[in-house]
Image (cartoon, helix red, strand yellow):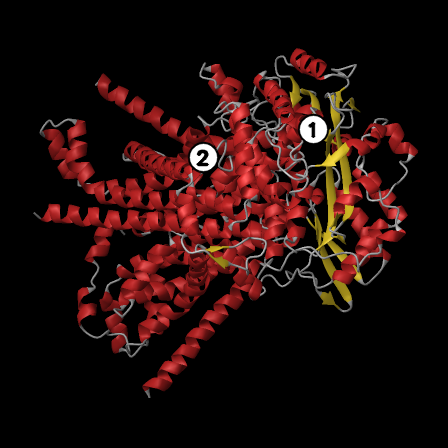
Amino acid sequence: MSRLRIGVTLRVVGVLVVMGIAVFPLYWMFVTALSSNADLFAADARLLPDFSELGVFADALADGEALTWLRNSLVIALGTTVLSIGLGIPLGYALSRFSFRGKMLTAVVLLLTQMLPEALMVVPLFALFNRFDLLDSLTGLVLANSAFVLPIVALILKGAIDGIPRELEEAGRVDGARPLTMLLRINVPLIGPSIAAAAVIAFFHAWNEYVFAVTFIYAPETQPASVGIANFIGEVGTPVQTVMAVAFMFTLPAVAFYLFAQKYVVAGMTAGAVKG
Amino acid sequence: MTLLEQRRAPRTEAGRRRSPLGSRWTPYLFLGPAAIFILLFQGVPLAQEVYLSFTRTSLLNPTNSTWVGLENYVDIFGDEDFRRTLRTTFVYVVACVAGSVGAGLLVALLLNRSFRGRGVVRALVTIPWAAPGIAVALIATWMLNPQYGIVNRFLDAVGLGVPGGAILDSSTYALPAILVTTVWQLFPLTSVVLLSALQAVPRDLLEAATMDGAGRWWTFRAVTWQVIKPTVGLLALLMTIWSIRRFELIWLMTKGGPVGSTETLVIDLYAQAFDSKQLGTAAAIGMVGVVISLIVIAGSRLVTRAAEKEGLR
Amino acid sequence: MRTTRVRRAMVAAATAAGLVVTAACGSDSDSSSDSGSDGGVTTLTFAASTFGDPGRGPKLQEWLDEFNASQDEIIVEAASVPYPTFGQTVLTQMGGGEGPDLVRFDMPEFEAASDAGLIAPLDDLVDVEQYDLLEEPDRFMVHDDVRHGVIFEASNYAMFYNADLIPEPPTTYDDFFATAQSLTAGDVFGLAFRQTEAEEAGVWQDIFNYVYGFGGAWSDGENLTINAPENLEGLQAYKDLYDANVIPRGADAATFRRMFAEGKVAMELNNGGYATHLRAESPNLNFSVAPIPFPVRSQGAILAPIVINEASEAKEEAATFIQWALEAENQAALQEILGASSVATATERSPESLQDMPFLTVFDELTETSLPQVVLGFEAQTPDIRKIVVQNVIAALQGDVDLETALDTAQEQATDLVG
């Protein structure tokens, strides 16, 4: 009996430790944002947030710059989500339902793109975007990010469509429905959760993307938050509190979005990871 | 949605007879837009990089390339620094895979019991995966700050302090610090995936093993491990490819320093392209990375196939 | 039959793809950044890392606003590219035939860019004869009789010290070392400088003062002299301070400057631009400035030229802005914003700023002995030489090699590089 109790206690302690490790850095970001200079540079750390310093968030947002960053990030992330899902559904459908010449090649290419580092593609993409006047525009970033996230999205959706019995479509075919209609009427509603998962993955990818953004964007009004925040690592000190306040506001939407869509994401991550 | 299900997916009949879904051009219509898109934004740039890797090209004048054949490749493989970069990449990737899969498995086993609040715990534990890499790099750098970072204060308090506290500024401790940060971000993903794989372990088998008086370790190896093995393998593959590619975290925390101790292939590639402005050398380094990834994937296929044959026999 | 169906389907697919793209992109219409003319108004972008400086950035923006209000044909917009990635971002864009119309460069990038033909020659665009340009910094703006830039900001290096901790500033290196050592206690450090690879450009600026302050030089104008005995002596002094733990090791500039503002760092070698920054951010800090107390009175200077991008489609308009900037009253206003830095022309310091910062004259007196932080004779390769030198010096700080070997290696690698 006592062995069992020790086991249970160990498990509880283990769960608490893991939770602490997972959450602490984000908590610390919050605490740091809410610290006075005196506390920040004191000999001993202050472990609790100082709520009298809440003004730091207002200050960080005051000149509107941080809000512009977050808005741009949101536009890029939503654009990438829409575009990659829009292209990913038909691609996933084709890979799942048809056999055609070049199918193997397509699969290999999708896998190959997973290995290309963004840093490698920056320069040729820069030249390409320059030609099409896509530099310094959110559109350009949407296109670049979609190209990188589309393969994962397509593979997740292919997996989902694989799971739908063909009989459902056979019935549709008898009624004379065309493939596109069947895809939209029969398959898409059934793979809702996987679309949600793929959407979250696409959204995160674009929300976090840094390499393209830092190279392709130079006007302050088109800068996304990833670049704006990285800019804080500067020459003259931006106060650590401001840095952490903005970083926290950048993290919060992603985490909130994740918690909101958690149920789907977990399923999607599983599918994505297993096939990705 | 596991690999097992995918394998069961009915594809044989589709392969044999003509597609039941319209003409033989139909698949290309579905495929077309995405294919054109990927070709334009991945294929074209990749082809350009392959070409660049055989040229000497300056970032300041990228349209003016001189064909140099294999010179860039000869140069990088003759360079002691590049061999160090390869070693660092290897260490980083192996440690990331082992760390993230190992930690993920531990956490998954810990959570693989129903208890009150498990949903909340699982949600909280997976938060690091949702945190943007840039924010993670910033908070990690601040936590590791030599003078005021909480990590150093903690290490000093328990008597394990690094002299001077300069963890990211030490060629000994910088890589481990980056590894811990990476694993912190990855373990939520691996643990969630492994947790769902663990659900597939047949309860009755576990119970039977326990009844027979088998030890926990034995049960784990004989039952649980057999079921989750394919998932572990695929996770390892995924983590490997991602870790070869990882950029922001390392770049923002150390830029590959000090003295190249955290310089992985991608960091080297970026520094060559943008600090040294040598696009040709950078492209060659990138190609080496792509080839390594291809070898990893091909190798993992072979292993999987061998394992399948083993299973059949 | 079949072909028409295929064609129709192809068109449909292309339209669908087009629609998706348009839908995804509909959200940013205001993003065309290039020098675009719209109803007779030309919009120029001006990239400078200083715009991101919390002390001076907003004031510089006001200064730009004054230009924009002074006429109605040109609008200059600030683009704040961050200091750490400034060179690589702007040079990538310019190499690709893109980028901002006006750029404030630091010297190493200025040299690399003008060597690569990315900067528009100014001789036909701006008549500099009519302005009273300061000769010493201005001579670095001209290569082989071609003018590539005009000084936007020139800032000499001096020793900043916390006057509460240090009543009398040290006047010799030994004194400097002893002061740093005696003030280092608890969470206070006697000195701070940059010593991490992540701040390569900053380390280069900092070690420059040690090399030149001990009589050394990176080159004699013809050959590299990275491992000259004077350089070794100067860098040994830098390393001794590092080894003596009188600096907050591993701290980046942003952190240790905040520490200086909090009274946790007693001394720092820095350029004049820092004075304004400190005044704005920490009005109560009692600090002062003295010349760097090294054996030889020779120190670095930040020279920051303003240039016109060769790829700009509005060079005339960009030149109009530079001419405006060079007018006496606008130079005076810029001078006030930049503080202890000087500008392109000789300006009088206002009595108010002299009363506020009496040490401003210290900087002015150093102009004769200050040098831009480039490798003379190898200006265009400065960024590459900088990388080699900084990496080897840091390897020596880390204890991987001794300093003498590190400098020999750097000399060898850099000589290879410049051919």
C-alpha span from label 2 to label 1: 32 Å
Q: Residue C275 in the image: x percent, y percent? A: 77, 31
| Circle 2 residue | B262
- In the picture shown, does residue B101 fall above or below C312? above
Tell me: A152 left or right of C36. left
Chain holding disc 2: B
Quarter of the N terminus of chain C within the rendering: bottom left
The residue under the point 27% across, 70% down is: A101
Q: Residue furthest left?
A: B313
Q: Quadrant of residue B97?
A: top left
Q: Residue C104 in the image: x percent, y percent? A: 71, 47
In the image, what residue type sits under mark 1? Answer: Tyr
* Residue A62 appears in the rendering: no
Chain holding disc 1: C
Q: Residue furthest front?
A: C222
Element type at mark 1: helix
| Circle 1 residue | C212
